Amino acid sequence: MSATQEAAEVAMPQRPGLLARLLREPAAALSLFLVVALLFAAICAPLLAPTDPYDNDLTKVMQPPGSPGLPLGADAQGRDMVTRLLYGLRVSLLMGFVAVLIGGGLGAVLGFLAAFYQRWLDGPVMRLVDIMLSFPAILVGLAIAAIFGPGIFSVVLALSVATIPLMARIVRGSALVVMRLDYIEAARATGMTDARLIWRHLAPNCLSAIFVFATLRFGQVILLGSALSFLGLGAQPPVPELGAMASEGRNFLFFAPHIAVVPCILIFIVVLAFNILGDALRDALDPRLRL
């Protein structure tokens, strides 16, 4: 290594990594810890849950939090709230993950195609996106539930459809910026095929925007999925799901409020953690904010 290269390395301090940039902000570090803890609790629910989520004990019906062996109380069927929350969190996170994966993937494909073939596809794709955005997600959920019947499949399908146009717009905007860069024209000049150009150059440079949006969208999808389940369109009893659990507990708000309040608090924590983490990722991945 020459003396000039050594001097350049000394003069240019190394930039902190993504994890280091997240951990140096208290709110981002706390949100990251909460997200990891929530994912761990959902994945390890069978190991952490003290009882079976479907076992009921009529001697413990609507026991308040702090009762012997029931830290968060029991529901109207005498089922342990801790167990139901762990499995409900598992179902809610799984629904959100599948919806973001499917809807985000299809939306990303539409966004890349609209930006890359702007002359032919941009107009039709964006008009389709506008039409999809004009329908509220709740209305889409009602329509899908009317066709396929209420259930987890209907909720996942509705959330996926609602995610497609949003992801398409984000990806299209990011891809249009990348398409104006010189190295894209240089890659075209070398005779690189369109598919290879999108895969090797366009998509990798849009990953940060996709990742940030997916994180932010995940919290919104959890909230929307819980709302659909609360309305009776999602998971059907006795399947534990946070929105469905809150719906089951609304009839007992005056004498057993914990049945509905505790799932709502957990929904609040999940959505808040993913929203803060998404904002922190956006700041950490923005080159203009890197130190």
Image (cartoon, grey):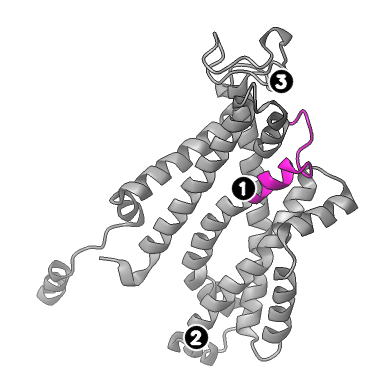
* Residue topped by disc 3: 76
Q: Is residue 35 left or right of residue 45?
A: left
Q: Look at discs 1 and 2 and give the one toward the viewer.
A: 1
* Residue topped by disc 1: 222
Q: Is residue 105 left or right of residue 209?
A: right
Query: Which residue type does callout 1 highlight?
Result: Ile
Q: Position of residue 170 (x, y in %)?
A: 56, 71
Q: Position of residue 156 (x, y in %)?
A: 73, 50
Which type of secondary structure does the marked residue at label 2 adopt? helix
Point out the image quarter for the C terminus: bottom left
Q: Are marks 3 and 2 in contact (CB under 8 Å)?
A: no
Residue 62 counted in the magenta span: no
Mark 2 neighbour class, 10 Å CA radius: few under 14, some 14 to 19, many 20 or more: some
Q: Is residue 148 left or right of residue 193?
A: right
Mark 1 neighbour class, 10 Å CA radius: few under 14, some 14 to 19, many 20 or more: many
Residue found 37% across the figure and 50% down from its top: 28
Residue extent of the magenta highlight: 223-240
